[in-house]
Amino acid sequence: MNESLHSILLHLHSVGRWIMLILLIIGIFNSLVAGERPYIKSDARTGLILTIVTDLMLVIGVVLWYFGPIGFQLVQSSGGFGAAMKDPVLRFYGVEHLTGMLIAVILIHIGKAQGKKNITDKKKHMRTMWFYLIALVIILATVPWPFRAVGAGRGWY
């Protein structure tokens, strides 16, 4: 992958991370404080925008993982997935980050789908909140934050 294209995609992925986290927190907060309030159009719209941003982050992330210098290419050059599992940094970028994010994307989609179910509005809000909250925890655990060994030197942006 061209270095400038990699840099652009990495910056998009970094900025998108913050947008996705903000939307996820908004979705959790809206569902948490909804109480008996009907599941309204703005709730569905927040879920829609969240899933669109999340899907874009997934596509960009998979492209970065497969074609970028860390991820699949690094795993292959180091001797395959068996060897990568012995190195914490290789394991994180080659397996853990991608797997965690895939699970989070699936949970976000399931959470959004709860708003379409023929159940009470309170159940819609509670189910949405729980799926979004679990996705948020998984995302926070599998991001290469600068204070973690796998994200050292990467910065917050």
Image (cartoon, grey):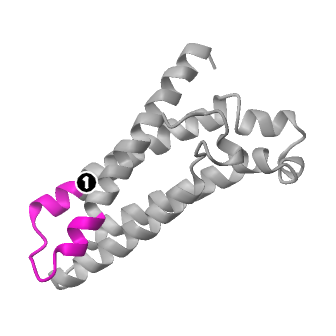
Q: What secondary structure is found at the residue carrying circle 1?
A: helix
Q: Nearer the viewer, residue 105 or 10?
A: 10
Residue 96: x and y, percent? Answer: 67, 55
| Residue occupying the point 65% across, 29% down | 67
| Residue occupying the point 49% across, 65% down | 137
| Residue occupying the point 76% across, 50% down | 91
| Residue occupying the point 39% across, 71% down | 131
Q: Can residue 102 be seen in this view?
A: no
Q: Nearer the viewer, residue 147 or 93?
A: 147
Q: Is residue 144 left or right of residue 24?
A: right
Alpha-carbon neighbours of circle 1 within 10 Å: few (<14), some, or many (≥20)?
some
Kindly identify the amino acid type of the residue bearing the numbered disc 1: Leu
Residue 44: quadrant of the picture = bottom left
Q: Is residue 137 magenta?
A: no
Count how many numbered circles sit on residues in the image. Answer: 1
Residue 53: quadrant of the picture = top left
Magenta region, residue range: 28-46
Q: Can residue 65 be seen in this view?
A: yes
| Residue highlighted by disc 1 | 48
Q: Is residue 31 magenta?
A: yes
Q: Is the magenta stretch mostly helix, strand or loop?
A: helix
